[in-house]
Amino acid sequence: MSAAPFSPLLARVAAIARQAGEAIMAVYAGDFDVEHKDDRSPLTAADLAAQTVIAQGLAALDEVLPVISEEARASDWEVRRGWDRYWLVDPLDGTREFVKRNGEFTVNIALIDHHRPVLGVVLAPAMDEVYAAERGGGAWMRRDDEGWLPMRSRALSDPPVVAGSRSHGGSDAVLLEQLLGGPFTTLAMGSSLKFCLIARADADLYLRRGPTSEWDTAAAQCVLEEAGGAVLDLEGMPLRYNRGESLLNPEFVAVGDSEIDWAERLARAQE
């Protein structure tokens, strides 16, 4: 296999994600129990196995940084507020899809620098797909251990294709029609793969009106931004990270065509 067309750090993080994916698939191949956290979201042995692999892998890198992960207790805000660089991790995004065994779950690892995702890896182990990006280096995907291919999002199609959640509500057909200027088609997908659909030019927009956590979006935001798209809050500003005590995101829209003035469209649609 040819060398990866990006930095050694991104290659290392992609390898860590791959190892986490192998741990997940070992659980996926057999019977597993499903527990529920306080917020009623599901938890399996695969989440915890991937967390262990990723924590060990990141700790072995040359630059050892703090880590925020869905499956580890986050440091208090008084500690986090001083962090300029840290890892933001979701060891298994789409646990509901994992439990359904539909393959639409991912490993997400992002490097945050001054509130922005500057490196991101999204791995879909059951699909054997990996997406990788770093600031200024473009966005790349690889399937089935073939070579790395560059990705670019597309100009808004006619009719537009809206990526929708497989297991959550949180979309708004009226707002979508106002944003897009008319009818659209939908394409359902689980986990952070919705962003990847846009990055690889298979969809145009993803609107999320329900709650998400920062680890749900950071890696895929980096991928989509480097592919030419954007992830914006409903005031039209890029999502930022480690903004305060809460690790919840504002509602947002992910878009592929960054030539459009989405801030103006959002403002007009919400008048």
Image (cartoon, rainbow, N blue to C red):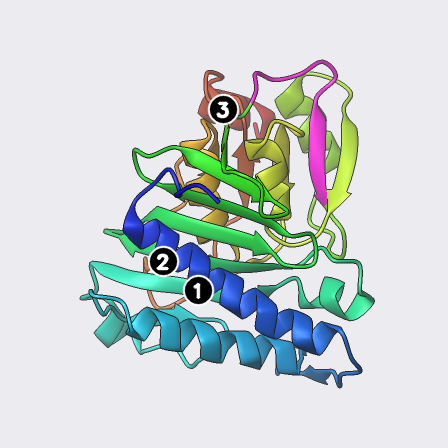
Residue depicted at x 58% and y 47%: 145
Label 3 Cα crowd, 10 Å radius (few <14 / some 14-19 / many 20+):
many
Q: Secondary structure at mark 3?
A: helix
Q: Amino acid at mark 1?
A: Ile
The reply to whether callout 2 and callout 1 are in contact (CB within 8 Å) is yes
The magenta stretch spans which residues?
Answer: 154-164
Question: Separation of disc 1 and disc 3 at Cα?
Answer: 35 Å
Where's residue 100, x and y in %?
81, 66
Residue depicted at x 76% and y 51%: 166
Marking on residue 117: none
Q: Amino acid at mark 3?
A: Trp
Question: Separation of disc 2 and disc 1 at Cα?
Answer: 6 Å
Q: Badge 2 is on which residue?
A: 12
Above or below for 96 versus 259: below
Q: Badge 3 is on which residue?
A: 262
Locate residue 101: give its quadrant.
Answer: bottom right
Taking the image as shown, residue 248 lies to the left or right of residue 66, namely right
Q: Amino acid at mark 2?
A: Arg
Which residue is nearer to you in this view: 95 or 58? Answer: 58
Q: Secondary structure at mark 1?
A: helix
Residue depicted at x 32% and y 78%: 75
Q: Badge 1 is on which residue?
A: 16
Where's residue 30, x and y in %?
78, 79
As drawn, the residue found furthest toward the front would be 1
Residue depicted at x 78% and y 33%: 186
